[in-house]
Image (spheres, grey):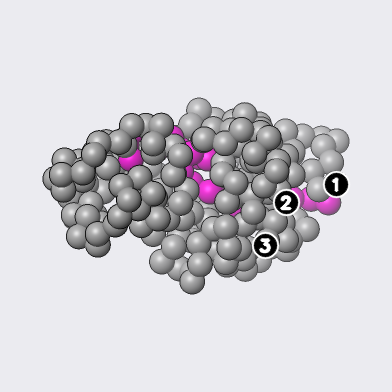
Amino acid sequence: MTIECVIFDFDMTLVDSSYAVTESMNRVAEKEGLPGVTREDVLSVIGIPIRESWEKIWGRFEESWLTDFRAGFSQQEYAGILPFPGTVRVLEELSTRGVRLGIASNRQKPAPPLQVLKLDGYFDSVVGMDDVERGKPAPDMILKGMSDLGGRPDTTLFVGDTADDMAAGRSAGIRPVGLTTGFFTPEVLYSAGAWRVFDSVEDVLSLFEPGATACD
C-alpha cells in the first residue's frame, strides 16, 4: 500500500530544540528564582505540554512564567532551534514524491518556529495544542492532521520520538514510526507501540525505496 501522508512531531523529531529550550528555561528560572535545568532535564520532558513539563521539573507551574517566556524568550528560543541533518532532504524528497505532510506537536503553536526555520512551506497541516482539546498521547491532533491532509489510516504514517507519540499514533489507528533522536530507547518506543524505529529522520526514506513493504 502506498504511503500518501506523513505526519511528523516537531521537537527532537525534525529539529534539535533541546539546547534552545534549555537556555530559554534557564532564563525563566533566573528571573523567577527557580533552580536551573540541564539539557538532560529538558530531554526528559520535551514533547510533554509545557505546563506539565515545567511542573514536572520545578514541582509547580505559574501562568506568569509562561507569560514572561512568551513575551521575552520565545524568539531567542526559535533562533536556537536547529534542523537535524537530513530533515530538509527528507521533506524535499517526500514533497517531490507527492506525499502530503503535516505536523502534530504538543507545542501550543508550532507554526512560528516552523516559519523562522523556513520549513513551513512543506506542510499542508500544522496542528498544536491550541488547535485540539487534548494533546498527545491522545490521538486528537493526529486525527485532525489526517483530516486536513485528506489521509486515511492505512496510507498515513506518524513519525515521532517519544512514547506518547507512539501511543498517539496507535490510538489514531495509524502506524507510528519512532526515532531515537530524543530521550527514548528503541525498546521503550517499541513497547509504546512503534511499528518501526530508526536512528534518524533520514532513515524514514527507506520506507519509500523500491520494493519496501511500507505498510505491511
| Tag 3 near tag 1, CB within 8 Å | no
**Is residue 154 left or right of 169 when viewed as pictured?**
right
Residue indicated by mark 3: 172
Residue indicated by mark 1: 216
Q: Nearer the viewer, residue 34 or 90?
A: 34
**Span of residues in magenta:** 1-21
Rendered location of residue 9, percent (x, y): 53, 48
Callout 3 amino acid: Ala
Residue 2 colored in magenta in the image: yes
Mark 2: few, some, or many residues within 10 Å (few <14, many ≥20)?
many
Rendered location of residue 152, percent (x, y): 73, 63
Q: CA distance from mark 2 to mark 1?
A: 10 Å
Residue plotted at (50% across, 62% down): 135
Secondary structure of residue under mark 1 = loop
Residue plotted at (23% across, 39% down): 35
- Vertically, is 197 above or below 50? above
Callout 1 amino acid: Asp
Which numbered dot is residue 205? none
Secondary structure of residue under mark 2 = strand
**Is residue 214 left or right of 181 when viewed as pictured?**
right
Residue indicated by mark 2: 175
Q: CA distance from mark 3 to mark 1?
A: 17 Å
